[in-house]
Amino acid sequence: MPPVDRKNPKRALSSESGFSLMEFVREFPDDEACLQWLWRNRHSPDGEHAYCPRCATARRFRRYQTKRPRQTWTCTSCTYQLHPTSGTIFHKSSTSLQLWFYAMWLMTSTRCGISAKQLERELGVTYKTAWRMFNLIRNRLMEQDYVGMLSGEVEADETFIGGKPRESTRREAKRLGWSMQALHWDRQPIVFGAVEREGKIRASMFLTLLKRSAFTS
Ligand SMILES: [Zn+2]
């Protein structure tokens, strides 16, 4: 057997999860990391510039420091505020973002999934909270993807619909070095598709769900 790197354990090839617990903890060590993930994936690929709906162009956004860390980013030109969680199932939830992410991970990283009761135990929240989270994740995020419909290896992709961004916006994006796709993130509805393939792997279902969660209200 090859030596095992204890600091960087590798998942067995037969593992069904696309994302191990170690990888989860590394990627999402706290609420702030989860918020930053949403910010970058929903609005700002470079973490600094985003499309401002009021200015109708890409602008620099800042996160103003107050005693309690702010959940919003502010347009430096017009003070318009973007909330990375708005329109998602986590918005204004009293449950922490990291617990939400962890719940999604738990529900997608095992073959059989887990029950609301197990979620209650794992997250240390009340049954009522666990049940609510369980249903939002299952019904709002997972339903269309695969419950009862797809099995085996699932290939998923999304595409953007709607018109092209304005010429001025495209120029601004080019100046900032953004890809056109990054520009689309914030502006156009997304059509999500998934197809079944041979095999029995639910490849990175967790990450797919996270992507979906960013666009589900
Ligand atoms: Zn603005």
Image (tube, rainbow, N blue to C red):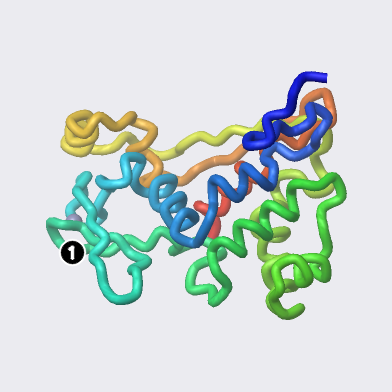
Q: Is residue 37 left or right of residue 127?
A: left
Instruction: Tell me residue 81's x, y (percent).
Output: 27, 64
Give the residue furthest to the left.
77
Residue at the image point whose x is 22% and y is 63% from the top: 80
> Mark 1 belongs to which amino acid?
Thr
Element marked by disc 1: loop
Report which residue position mark 1 lands on.
79
Give the camera-side residue of 48 and 67. 67
Q: Is residue 213 left or right of residue 107?
A: left
- Name the image quarter holding residue 13: top right
109 is higher (above) or lower (below) than 166: below
Can residue 194 be seen in this snapshot? no
Q: Is residue 203 left or right of residue 162?
A: right
- Determine whether the beta carbon of the residue marked 1 sits less than 8 angstroms from the nearest atom of ligand 1: yes
Give the camera-side residue of 33 and 47. 33
Give the residue furthest to the right.
112
The quadrant of the rendered image in which ligand 1 is seen is: bottom left
Give the camera-side residue of 54 and 14. 14
